[in-house]
Image (spheres, grey):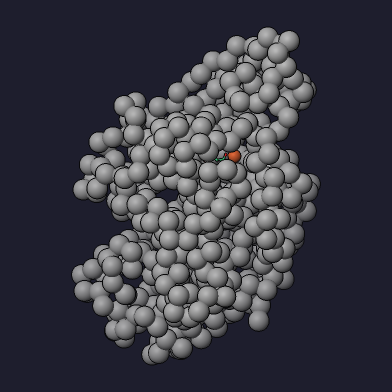
């Protein structure tokens, strides 16, 4: 079956962890004077400035728990070599400290050796392996849920920040623990042939450094949450930009011999709940300073514009029936589905009640198939855009087959959205959906609807953009985006 929970068209290229990450972080042969790479001692290093990024208090909105999300962009200026509108995004308060601690616990439950010394990782796939026995895989699914939830939040923020709404797909998601002694030399994140599909990098920090300079100490804990445990020292993320604003030739020269040009270091200190995102291109050279004490925890994500390179959650989604079957009260479930499914699938109808978990699963499959067919139909009636001529190279919408393809991508998100609300329920309320009190459920649905509203606003923006570019010619944006 096409679409739905069956991801036949998705991620045909299933790369193993070893293939994907082998040598991934072998540093480039470039260096600046401030890292550990071997230097040619006969050359005098050029000076390096350091800018320590301070996140201001301007809130850009509210996160899932109602906590404000603050953002800082490092402005383009003469010292930095930023490319067009691309920039480094920094968001604070993306997750509450308790949520970070949950993710740390999830990591600890399944961690295994990572791609450099003193690094352990837990991929989302490690939590949804279909090879486990059914009872242990069930509990792994539960562990995967907060990770999926966090991934969804970061995904949306990164898409919005880079003006790529509905154009990005997670390529890789993993929790990581950077133990004492770990570090990464200067590199960029698409620095291997097999990493070409990595377009944007995002790191969500899960714990605070415990040195005195940490500006995160009390503010994060103010929201009625406990302090983050497991502090660490060192571990700053440091970008190295060529000292002067430069063109491509100069960038090449810098690669050939960075010591001669000098650089400005942009130093970002981790903080629990802080998300940093940046393009994975060679202009965004960065390193991780050595962790000199303790363990630094991250949720590390890469995003791709290539739908085919999206990481697969197949085995996780196959276990969705188990997740659903753990919700017991029919009334509340029905109410939940009535609200969620039409909104998620955009067809506004529910012609089949959800009476059993099996029916729910079937309904989910059918609805998604229907949505897929609907989009296929749209694809036939739209005028396919001549994207290459209509879009210039700087547009985030890359070479596309047609606008419907882009829209259809949003369908892949639906299983994740369903998982997300279950995740929220389990991990925030500690109960299965069915056993929620009515008031709680109402709050939950309200929060969920706000979330979905935001996504639809994003869809509308995307639709407007596609219309501006002539990608959509014979439908209106209201037809394009189902009303709530
Ligand atoms: O953890 C960080 O701050 C950055 C990690 C990084 O650069 C990488 O994994 O490629
Ligand atoms: Fe990196």
Q: Residue 260 is drawn in which quadrant?
A: top right
Q: Give residue 339's position: percent from left, percent from top.
A: 37, 74
**Rendered position, 358 above or below 227:** below
Query: What residue is rendered at 30% in x and 79% in y?
Result: 434
Q: Give residue 299's position: percent from left, percent from top.
A: 48, 49
Q: Give residue 205's position: percent from left, percent from top.
A: 43, 43
**Rendered position, 22 above or below 255:** below
In this orientation, which residue lies closer to the viewer: 279 or 146? 146
Query: What residue is rendered at 77% in x and 23% in y?
Result: 256
**Rendered position, 24 above or below 364:** above
Total tally of numbered discs in the picture: 0
The quadrant the C terminus occupies is bottom left
The quadrant the N terminus occupies is bottom right
| Lateral position of residue 440 relative to residue 248, left or right | left
**Rendered position, 48 above or below 107:** above
Query: Which quarter holds ligand 2?
Result: top right
In this orientation, which residue lies closer to the viewer: 139 or 199? 139
| Lateral position of residue 157 relative to residue 7, left or right | left
Query: What residue is rendered at 53% in x and 75% in y?
Result: 132
| Lateral position of residue 446 relative to residue 166, left or right | left
In this orientation, which residue lies closer to the viewer: 324 or 230? 230
Q: Residue 117 is drawn in which quadrant?
A: top right
In this orientation, which residue lies closer to the viewer: 156 or 118? 118
Residue 93 visible in the displayed image: no
Query: What residue is rendered at 72% in x and 66% in y?
Result: 12
Residue 212 visible in the displayed image: yes
Q: Give residue 137's position: percent from left, percent from top.
A: 48, 74
């Amino acid at each position: 079956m096409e679409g739905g929970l069956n991801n036949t068209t998705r991620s045909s290229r299933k790369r193993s962890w070893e293939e994907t990450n082998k040598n991934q972080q072998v540093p480039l042969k470039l260096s600046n004077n401030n890292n550990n790479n071997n230097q040619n001692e006969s050359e005098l290093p050029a000076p390096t400035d350091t800018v320590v990024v301070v996140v201001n208090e301007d809130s850009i909105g509210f996160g899932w728990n109602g906590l404000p999300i603050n953002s800082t962009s490092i402005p383009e200026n003469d010292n930095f070599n930023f490319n067009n509108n691309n920039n480094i995004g920094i968001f604070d308060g993306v997750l509450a400290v308790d949520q970070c601690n949950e993710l740390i616990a999830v990591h600890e439950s399944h961690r295994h050796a990572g791609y450099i010394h003193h690094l352990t990782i837990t991929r989302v796939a490690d939590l949804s392996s279909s090879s486990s026995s059914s009872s242990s895989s069930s509990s792994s699914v539960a562990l995967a849920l907060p990770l999926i939830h966090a991934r969804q939040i970061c995904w949306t923020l990164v898409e919005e920040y880079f003006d790529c709404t509905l154009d990005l797909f997670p390529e890789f998601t993993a929790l990581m623990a950077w133990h004492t002694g770990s570090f990464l030399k200067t590199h960029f994140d698409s620095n291997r042939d097999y990493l070409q599909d990595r377009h944007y990098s995002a790191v969500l920090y899960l714990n605070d450094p415990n040195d005195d300079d940490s500006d995160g100490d009390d503010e994060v804990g103010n929201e009625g949450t406990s302090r983050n445990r497991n502090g660490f020292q060192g571990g700053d993320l440091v970008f190295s930009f060529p000292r002067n604003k430069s063109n491509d030739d100069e960038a090449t020269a810098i690669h050939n011999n960075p010591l001669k040009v000098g650089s400005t270091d942009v130093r970002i200190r981790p903080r629990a709940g802080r998300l940093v995102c940046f393009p994975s291109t060679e202009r965004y050279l960065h390193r991780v300073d050595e962790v000199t004490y303790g363990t630094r925890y991250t949720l590390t994500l890469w995003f791709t514009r290539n739908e085919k390179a999206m990481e697969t959650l197949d085995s996780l989604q196959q276990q969705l029936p188990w997740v659903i079957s753990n919700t017991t009260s029919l009334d509340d479930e029905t109410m939940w589905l009535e609200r969620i499914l039409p909104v998620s699938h955009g067809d506004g109808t529910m012609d089949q009640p959800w009476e059993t978990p099996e029916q729910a699963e079937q309904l989910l499959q059918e609805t998604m198939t229907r949505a897929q067919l609907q989009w296929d139909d749209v694809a036939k009636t739209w005028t396919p855009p001549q994207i290459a001529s209509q879009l210039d190279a700087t547009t985030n919408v890359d070479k596309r087959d047609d606008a419907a393809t882009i829209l259809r991508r949003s369908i892949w998100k639906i299983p994740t959205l369903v998982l997300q609300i279950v995740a929220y329920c389990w991990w925030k309320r500690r109960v299965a959906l069915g056993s929620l009190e009515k008031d709680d459920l109402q709050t939950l649905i309200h929060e969920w609807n706000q979330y979905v509203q935001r996504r639809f606003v994003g869809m509308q923006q995307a639709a407007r953009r596609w219309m501006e570019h002539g990608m959509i010619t014979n439908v209106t944006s209201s037809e394009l985006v189902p009303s709530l």
